[in-house]
Image (tube, helix red, strand yellow):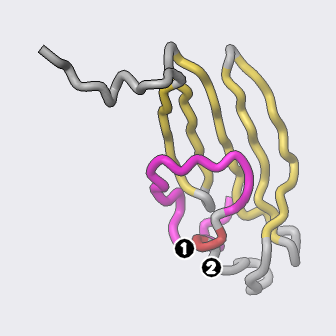
Amino acid sequence: MCGGCVEKEYPNRGNICLENGSFLLNFTGCAVCSKRDFMLITNKSLKEEDGEEIVTYDHLFKNCHHIIARHEYTFSIMDEFQEYTMLCLLCGKAEDTISILPDDPRQMTLLF
């Protein structure tokens, strides 16, 4: 999309996966109209493929309607875990895995 509008392309966001919204701290201003204002979310779609939810949308600059980035968020359940991913030029890349069990088996210690 537009690398000239962001401070850093695809910043590493750790485990912060956004299903909606915009990471405005990474927005330096529009490369087309040279202004800095809010984003609009357009062309939002939700589809399911093989048990995976995929949310996609465009970050559109409010003033000149320049498309800044395409955002993709996925959610799925694998075994006993919920898995989330995000990939966006503006918002960054991230992934997270959360246990659906009351006690996360990854956090349990072995007792002998």
Q: Earlier in the sequence, mark 2 or mark 1?
A: 1
Q: Nearer the viewer, residue 33 or 38?
A: 38
At label 1, counting other C-alpha atoms closer than 10 Å, the crowd grade (few under 14, some 14-19, many 20 or more) is: some
Q: Residue at x 74, y 38 (%)?
A: 55
Q: Secondary structure at mark 1?
A: loop
Question: Where is residue 91 shown, x and y percent of the image?
Answer: 61, 58
Q: Which residue is mark 1?
A: 7
Q: Residue at x 48, y 26 (%)?
A: 99
Q: Residue at x 72, y 64 (%)?
A: 68
Give the main secondary structure, helix, strand or loop, of the magenta stretch: loop
At label 2, counting other C-alpha atoms closer than 10 Å, the crowd grade (few under 14, some 14-19, many 20 or more) is: some
**Cα distance, mark 2 to mark 1?**
6 Å
Tell me: residue 19, above or below residue 12: above
Residue stretch in magenta: 1-22
Q: Are marks 2 and 1 in contact (CB under 8 Å)?
A: yes
> Residue 42 vs residue 80: left or right?
right
